[in-house]
Amino acid sequence: LAQLKKQKADLLTKWTASAPDVKEIQFQIDALERQIAAGGGAGRASGASPASADPSPRKALDTALAETNAQLQKLQGDTQTLRNSIAGYERRVESAPAAQPELDAVNRDYQSARDVYDSVLKKYNDATLAESAQHVATEQFRVLDQAIPPTLPAGPNRPRLLVIAMILAIALACGMAMLLDRLDTSFHSVDDLRTFTRVPVLASIPSIQTFGDRLRARTRTATGAAATLVFLAGLGVAAFHAGRMGEAVVRTLLRVG
Amino acid sequence: MNTMNKMLLTAPPETRRERCDPHLVSLKDPASFEAEQYRRLRQRLEDLRAARDARLFAVTSPVAGDGKSLTAVNLAASLAQAAKSRVLLIDADLRRPTIAGLLGLKGDRMPDFGSALDADGGSLSDLVNPASPSGLMVLPSRACRGAYERLRSPRLPELLQEARRHYDFVILDTPPIVPVPDSALLGKFVDGYLMVVAANRTPRKLLGEALNLLEPASVVGLIFNRDDRPLFGYYRSRYRDYFQSYLHSVDRATA
C-alpha cells in the first residue's frame, strides 16, 4: 500500500488528478484499503491468526503493482515517441520556406507546359474543322450564273449629287440664319424699340467710328477673309487627293478585270 | 485739391482734347453728325428743365457695355456748350469707374466721388471748383470695395442737393441696372433716368427687366446707341451731301 501511495505521489507530480493513470492507481489504493479494513475486522472477530489471511492480498497487490509499473513504462515510452514525432514535424515546418521557391518553379513549368498543350490542341481542332469544311465546300458549291464584267466605268451620278449638295447647303444656310435670328433678341432699329416699349426714345446715336475703330474692323474683316480662303484651298486640295485616290482604285480594278 | 481741379478742368481745351478718348465727339469734333445727335438729346433735356426744373439725370443701361459712360460724357459736354451753362458730370459707377480714363484724367490728387461720400468727405465746392471758367466740371471716381454701402451714405443726398443748387445740369454715370442695385438707389435723388440701349446688343428681355426695376415715371426716355440704321436710312448719301455742304458753308462763313 505504501508503495502504491508513493507511486501515486510520483504520478501526481507528472499528471493532474484527473489523468486516467492516477485515477486507476487511486482506485487500486481504495480497493487495498477496503481489503485491509475487512481483513482487520475479520481477524479481530474470528480471533484467527491474521498471518494466514495475509499472503493472498499481498500477492495480488504485488501483481497489481507490477502491472501498473509496466503500464507506466509503456506510457512513458509512448510519450517519448510522440515527442520525437512532434520534433520531426517541427523540423519539416521549419524547412517549408526553403521549399517554397522550388514549388513555385515547378508550378511555373507546369503552367507553361499546360499553355503549350492548350494552343496545340486548339490548332489541332481548327485544322480538323478546316479539313471538314473543305470537304463540304468542294462538294456543295458550283457556278450557276457567270458574272458579266461592266463594259463602261461605273461612277456616281455627278449632276444629281451636285444638285443635292446645293439644296442641302442652301437649307443649312437658311436654318443657320433662322436660328441666329431666333437667338438674337436685340433691337435693330429705333422702330423696334418703339414697338417694344412706350417709353419715349429721346435720341438715336449713330455708332461712332474713329480711325482706330475702322482700322480694327478692316483688319478683322481681312483676317476672316484670309482664313476662309485658306480653309477653302485646303478643302480643294483634300478633295483633289481623294479623287485621285479613287481613280487609282478604279484603274487597279479594271486591270484585274 | 482745388488747385489740382483747376489744373485739370481749366486746362486749355487743346491739351485736354489730345488726352481724351477719340469717341468723345462732343469734345473733339462738335460739328460732326454724331455730335449733332447728342445735341438733339441735350435739347430734350433742356426742354425738360424748362418744363419741370429737372436738372439731375442718371445715365444707366440694362447691362454693362452698352455705352453709358460715353453717352454721359458726350451729353454733358454737349450741355456745357450752351452759353453760361454750368454742367457737372459725376462718375457714380464706383465699381468700374471709366470717366477719368475717357477724359484722360490722372494723378493721385484727382477728386474722388467715392471718398466724398464718406462722413468726412467735405462739401462739393471743396471737390469741384464752381468758379471754373469751363462750363463742364467733372467729379470722377476710383474703383472701391463696398460700392453699394458707400452709395447708401447720407452724404449722397447732401452732395446732390448742393450740386442742384450750383449747376444747371448734373449728369451721373451709373452702373448697369440689372446686375447691381446701385443705380436704383439713386432714384430718390435724381429727376430722371436716361436708359441707354445698344443697337444689336441689348436683349429685349433685359430692357424689360430694367424698366420693371425702375419707377415707370422716373425713366425720362431711352437713348438708342450705336444705331447702324439711322433714321435717314437709304437717303443717307443725300443727307451727307447736304450735311457736308452745310459744314462747308459754315467754314466759308467763319473764314
Image (spheres, rainbow, N blue to C red):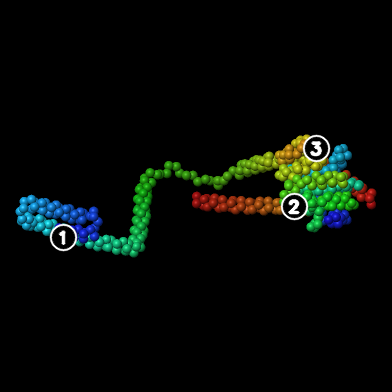
Q: Quick check: B134 left or right of A244?
A: right
Q: Chain of mark 1?
A: A
Residue at mark 1: A3
Q: Secondary structure at mark 2?
A: loop
Residue at point 8%, 53% (across, down): A43
Q: Callout 1 environment at 10 Å: few (<14), some (14 to 19), or many (20+)? A: few
Q: Amino acid at mark 3?
A: Pro
> Mark 1, mark 3: which one is toward the viewer?
1
Q: Chain of mark 2?
A: B
Q: Is residue A110 above or below residue B158?
A: below
Residue at mark 3: A200
The percent position of residue A104, horizontal first and vertical second, equals 35, 60
The percent position of residue A195, horizontal first and vertical second, equals 76, 35
> Mark 3, mark 2: which one is toward the viewer?
2
* Camera sees residue A36: yes
- Numbered circle sitting on residue B131: none
When asked about the image quadrant of residue B55, the answer is top right
Q: Chain of mark 3?
A: A
Q: Secondary structure at mark 1?
A: helix
For the residues labelled 1 and 3, the Cα–Cα distance comes to: 136 Å
Q: Secondary structure at mark 3?
A: loop
Q: Is residue A84 above or below residue B143?
A: below
Same-chain check, marks 3 and 2: no
Residue at mark 2: B143
> Mark 1, mark 2: which one is toward the viewer?
1
**First in sequence: mark 1 or mark 3?**
1
Residue at point 20%, 56% (across, down): A21
Q: Amino acid at mark 1?
A: Gln
